[in-house]
Amino acid sequence: MKTCWPLLILTVLLAGCPLPNHRLALRIRDDIPVSPEGRSLAWYQTVGVELEPGNQVELINNGHVFDVLEREIRAARSSIHILVYIWRAGDPSDRIIQALRERRPGVACRILVDPLGSMRFENTVGPHLVAAGCEVRIFRPLQGTLSALDLKRFQSRLHRKVAVFDGESGVTGGWGIWKAWLGEGRQPEHWRDASLLVKGPAVRGMQLAFAQNWQEAGGGMLPAEAFPDIPPTGQARAGFVTHTSAPVLTNAERMTLLAIASAKRRLWISNSYFIPTGAMQDMLIAKVKAGVDVRVLTPGDRHHDVGPVLAGQLAIYDRLLEHGVRIFEYQVSMMHSKTLLVDDELCMVGSTNLDPLALSAEEGSLVVDDARMAGQLAQVFEEDLKHSVEVRWDSWRRRGLFKRLSERVTLLFGEYL
């Protein structure tokens, strides 16, 4: 058999090709304080958000998010604010629209959606929301952006998922308003996802995220009653970290690196689009060497919804597996969760994917410092592992030359994955 030298040379070159990342790498030491107050100060110094005490936080899995949204809509007394990446016609959209129609008299409703994720929204869903008395706006309309070759604007999408009610309670996570989020995440047509309902001071940050995106879309200032003084309602410390595109370093990167650096015993990550930067990979490997139990749960190839992202995900397996990071692939449906669990106290749930494109999008995650919530998230993670397969380094490294090459080629388009 003759050797295909051009293919072999290209493979060798790509094998050493780092993930395109033009941002400054943040170096965070792992001597993060272990007290709740110390951790809160670390988050404030890194991303400008304190983990405030006094929050009540509830984990919401899969399609149950729509039950919570309907309940909160009907209970709202002054305002309903929803911003979301995907809102498409059908069930569960019809359920949410009906709840909005039946909301209490005088409750203001403001809706903001991204046009890329919410295809045909303006013709299929928007008119029904307007008829229900909601003010509806589109974030960064796409008309003319490609003809002007404004790719950065095209990339910078509203990927946050936030619903805020009366400025006092809020829902965030990976959810969208579409049929894929129905069910229990155990069938191919039903995606696996995680969300949080929070009541307490952390909601103010979620309301602020909505207000800033709303203003950019042409909406007016929110009234004073949208930002009420919120008394303590629970025991959890929490804060909502927002991030948007930046030329050097985003809050998404700062947030993720700080969470990784904080791990002393356990670091369990669920992420739907897992192509971490070189700095994140370095820190994951360093944690393994320090004896931390590092596990990553990603979508498997059977149900992954974005082929190029899957290829980029597979391309970074080599280095992580070789250095002891354990990787599991979810088998029964598209795994869409974006969660991170640190030790027995700290967790993150939100819309933040760990791929380059997410660093150019409007994102947000709720950071929670609470042993009860961390315990619940650990139980869910372990249950998800029962429906997953571990990728083993000894077998992974023996896969064929063509597969290796096709995976590495995707990294040439890294910032668009």
Image (cartoon, rainbow, N blue to C red):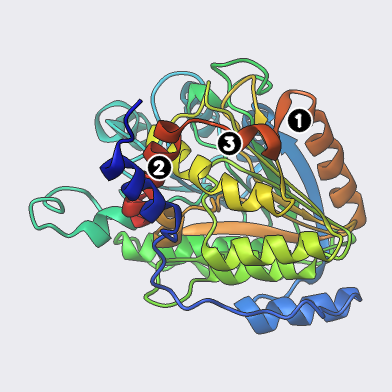
**Hey, what amino acid is under mark 1?**
Asp
Residue at position x 48%, y 30% in the image: 400
The picture places residue 92, in percent across and down from the top left corner, at 52, 23
Q: Nearer the viewer, mark 1 or mark 2?
A: 1
Quote the CA–CA distance across marks 1 and 2: 38 Å
* Element on which disc 2 rests: loop
Seen in the image, is 83 located left or right of residue 53? left
Mark in front: 3 vs 2: 3
Tell me the residue that label 3 is attached to. Answer: 336
| Residue plotted at (67% across, 29% down) | 67
Give amino acid for label 2. Cys
Residue ID at (90%, 61%)? 235
Q: Name the foreground residue: 332 vs 70.
A: 332
Where is residue 120 shown, x and y percent of the image?
Answer: 27, 30
**Nearer the observer, 337 or 214:** 337
Q: Amino acid at mark 3?
A: His
In the displayed structure, 124 sits above or below 50; it is above
Quick one: SS at disc 3?
loop
Label drawn at residue 134: 2
Q: Is 105 rendered above or below residue 301? A: below
Quarter holding the N terminus?
top left
Label 1, residues with CA under 10 Å away: few <14, some 14-19, many ≥20: many
Depicted 112 relative to depicted 184: above or below: below
Kindly identify which numbered label has been placed on residue 384: 1
Residue 53, image x and y in percent? 83, 69
Q: Residue furthest left?
A: 147
Disc 1 to disc 3, how far (Cα)? 12 Å
